[in-house]
Amino acid sequence: MSFRARGFLRSAISVAVVLMVGSGVALTQSPPANPADPQQVIQFLSQTINWHRQLTVESQIAKDPGDAILVNDNRQIANQVVRLAFDFARADADVLAKQATSKDSQAQNPDLGRYQALTQLSAKLDNQARELQGELERLRQKLDAAGPGNRKSLQSAIAEVQSELDLTNVRRDALRSMAEFVSGTGANGVGPTGLRAQIDAMARALSPELAQPGSNGENTQPSRQLAPASFSPSDKSSSSGIWGLTAALLELSDKIRTIDHTGRMTDELTEASKQLRTPLVNQLKDLSKQGDQLANQPDSSDPTVLAQQKKQLDALTAQFKQASTAVLPLSKQGILLGLYKRSLASWKSAVETEYKTVLRSLLLRLFILAGVLIVVIAVAELWRKTIFRYVHDPRRRYQFLLLRKILLWFVICLVIAFAFASQLGSVATFAGLLTAGVAVALQNVILSIAGYFFLIGRFGIRVGDRVQIAGVTGEVVDVGLVRMHLMELSSVGAEIPTGRVVAFSNSIVFQPASGLFKQIPGTNFVWHEITLTLSPDSDYRVAEERLLGAVETVFADYREEIERQRRQMERTLSSTPINELCPKSRLRLTQAGLEAVIGFPVDLQRAAEIDDRVTREVLKAIDREPKLKLVGSGTPSIRLSTELTPANVSG
């Protein structure tokens, strides 16, 4: 064998070894393989396109500038991977088309022969159109530089060439349309002739750039249809609250799942590319082995032997070129998919690091929240024990416990709101608007709650107190946070209930028109008065002394009790001196005569009895000689005094 032939074989073997090492395939002997099946090629392209569409999902989860940079880098790699997949598919379709030109194949499928004839005619017309276009350009250049005498003949020549070019283009377009129709009808459109048409259709559907054959994937320009990944900037400081951290944690978890899904799709595409590449690499190894066998044959000077060796070398060269044209895109694709996989792994590692950081922040927040709530509850429990230890009055104890409960839940809600809030400014704004709305909608309720704390003050009311509110006299049976209830007492006697319960809002303490009257703590008396109208000729001194003496006779029996209550009033109202509580009289001239009014304190527990005794004594005093002359009905009346009420305190 000649030195040139041996040099070619050595070069071919070196290229084959580089391809096999780059693709990571073990050097094992295998028989030559045929090109990939058309169905397998279409399936591989569909899988590649589906994998490429995952970039849209990646763009949606890119929230940071770093994520956007990674997505854009992945987009560059993905575009190259798709382009290399179409380069492989086109190379495989060319191999299948060349194999289909054999006589046996054309005998089995007459459409193949028609397709080849139409393709050849279309190619000839393409060459003819290019020649005519070149001739037309040359004639136009001559026309620009020609003189007046030659311009007419050149214009006629340009018109003739233009007509020939139009006719050639029409014939070429018709042949191309017919060739595409024939290629689509063979083997359901997925045969050797229909494969290339489907590949071009899929490329045009994905991107116009992919419809043009590349140079084994060397064109690294990104697709124009796919916009660069954008990101939505997120303020990390706004995720300081539990709510924001939880949302960030869920977002990062979804991002990790998306990256894992993309990684699995990349692994599947890598495996599919490897399955298509392995038979081609084995074919290259077999061709290299056959070249070694030819190179090791003894040198010969026989022209016949040399011609035979040259024929074999040419066949090996053609086969090696066909196989390498298909295996190079797949080998480059395998390298790019490895880079894509490493990019996803780096992205996932960064997201997992951020996920762990956010998770630690969330757990720390929850731990702090739990600690603060435990401290608040512990303080509330200590407060409760202190109340039970130092407050023995059941009413006061209930009031302090109620206040403790209100403050406890208010503090808990406040702590939780600030813990879950992402921005304190938004919480303050929301709290302000909420407070204003509540204040307007529940102003009466708020006033009632505020009035409750006035009612439980030093001179407040408690269950069992006799009070007078808006002209209603009754005994307090309940004091709630919003309203209180009175058992109404009859005006006939202080001890007689009417059978009705009257409810008043606690906000009544802020209403100036509705007075609240109750007994001073430690007292239990009211002032009653008896009124008589004497004739004008009566001796007012005798009448006053006789009536006042009758009342003092009854008052003497409970004077000590009234005095005790007076001293209690002085202790309660330490800054106010209290005069002696005893019967008092006053006279007043009227049109009917002289009106005598005797006021006297009455113990509420014995009010009916005292009034009855006073009435009897007054009647006796009137009937004593000389009798007192009365005007009108002549019967004295006893009523509750509205002027002498030192034991009442207005609320």
Image: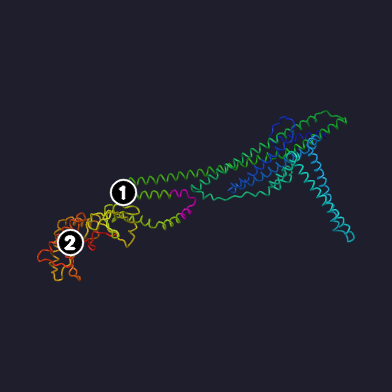
Amino acid, disc 1: Arg
Q: Give the residue furthest to the front.
A: 633
Q: Are marks 2 and 1 in contact (CB under 8 Å)?
A: no
Q: Secondary structure at mark 1?
A: helix
Measure how far apart labels 2 and 1 are at the Cα level: 40 Å
Relative to 542, is 50 on the left or the right?
right
Q: Residue 232: tell me if it is visible.
A: yes
- Camera-side mark, 2 or 1: 2
Q: Is residue 417 magenta?
A: yes
The residue that appears at 84% across and 29% down in the rendered structure is 299
**Where's residue 458, x and y in %?**
29, 55
Q: Give the residue furthest to the left.
A: 625
Q: Quadrant of residue 286?
A: top right
Q: Quadrant of residue 203?
A: top right
Relative to 471, is 4 on the left or the right?
right
- The residue singled out by tag 2 in the image is 583
- The residue singled out by tag 1 in the image is 397
Q: Is residue 53 magenta?
A: no
**Where's residue 431, x and y in %?**
45, 54
